[in-house]
Image: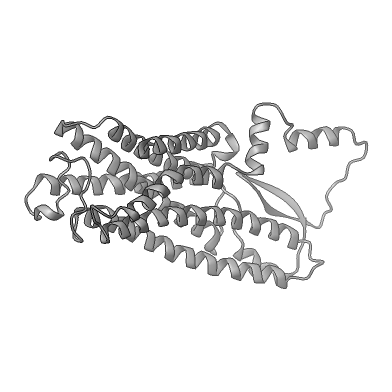
Amino acid sequence: MYPIGLLISCCFYALTLIVYISIAKLRNLPGKILICLVSSLFAAYLGIALGQLRPTSNDDICFLSGFFVYFCLMAAFSWMNITSFDIWKTFGSTKIKSCEKSDLRRQFIWYSCYGWGLPTLLTGITIAFTKSDILPDVVRPNFGHGRCWFTYDSFGSASLLFFSGPVGILFIINLVLFVLTMKYCNKVKNEIYKMQSLNSDKPVLKRRFFQDKTRFVMNTKLCFVMGITWLLEIVSILFYDHKKTFFWTISDSFNVLLGIFVFIIFVFKRRIYNEIMIKFGLQSSPSTASTRTRAGLTKSYAPTSTAMTTLRSSPGSCELSRQPSTKPENESLMKLVPQFNRK
């Protein structure tokens, strides 16, 4: 039943990918990061499921399939690390970010170098130790030597050294970034609520703050769920016993449900539903409805000469809006709040 559950999870990964690839507004920088993460999980789960449904005694096939799954899983955790870093950089940095497409493209290239480069490096190191006799057999991966994945015969197993250990380091980094982002989140929230209620900038800043906070909460949920699966993996290794499979049952259950969790966190939302309806022409977009409304008006309003240009953020876009000049008391706050949601 376990491989069937993995295939069901793959279906939810596939649905998530289809939604984020087909809808242009979701293909911003955070959306591209999510696409890379989910595609890695999809490939890993598919490889594990097929390997269990059709086991092989061919050592070469076992070697290739084992390291393929290893690479995909390490890539998924690497992109999870990038997700945590990106939300910290967007929400936790006091620097004003650029909206230029070229800058965002360059940033995604750097992310890709890390997201695909780190698992490539770790896979290469693991292969090197598999082919050499430097390490004792108990901590050697030995993919393709009668097995396609790590064994869990002792506390010092190869899984702790080559898989669970590196993943644990990535999660420690995620935890540090989470604390820093949460600290900054509370700082911005307090600054916003200290503003005078009649201040014209307060609604804009609150909207911008809650947009970034929503994304932070979603990524925190994903990191938490993936962290639970990793923690259960560690517990299962520490209490490994061929006759007692309680921890393995819990760990496998979370692995099977991970695809469903990802779908619920990132797709099962009202905003995504509206975008899907707009995509298939079953609902008018807000911009189209707004254009039709303005076309029926006979009176136009021009901005006053005292207006100043400020950035207004919307999901996946960066645009300019005209706002009345504000008092100097808000200058420090404008530096705190992220200046845009990136494409």
Is 180 above or below relative to 7? below
The answer to whether residue 29 of the structure is visible from this angle is: no
Identify the residue shown where x is 65% and y is 38%: 273
In the image, taking residue 194 as reference, residue 17 lies left or right, namely left
Q: Residue farthest to the top?
A: 281
Q: Is residue 106 above or below residue 58?
A: below
Which residue is rendered at x = 48% and y = 63% of the image?
A: 178
Residue 20 occupies quadrant: top right
Q: Residue at x 65, y 57 (%)?
A: 210
User: Could you say where residue 6 lies in the image, as x and y percent from the top left?
Assistant: 39, 38
Front-lying residue, 10 or 30: 10
Q: Hey, which residue is sitting farthest left in the picture?
A: 133
User: What is the quadrant of the C terminus in the image?
Assistant: top right
Along the line of sight, the residue nearer the viewer: 23 or 148? 148
Q: Position of residue 255 (x, y in %)?
A: 40, 47
The residue positioned farthest toward the front in the image shown: 243
Q: Position of residue 302 (x, y in %)?
A: 85, 46
Q: From the viewer's perspective, is 74 left or right of 275? A: left
User: Is 20 above or below relative to 243?
Assistant: above
Closer to the camera in the image, 273 or 248: 248
Q: What colour scheme was applied to this rendering of the protein?
A: one colour
Residue 116 appears in the figure:
yes
Q: How many marks?
A: 0
Left or right of residue 300: residue 174 = left
Question: In the rendered view of the protein, which quadrant contains the N terminus?
Answer: top left
Q: Is residue 129 shown left or right of residue 104?
A: left
The image quadrant that residue 134 belongs to is bottom left
Residue at 36%, 37% (x, y): give it.
3
Percent coordinates x, y for residue 27 in the rendering? 54, 38
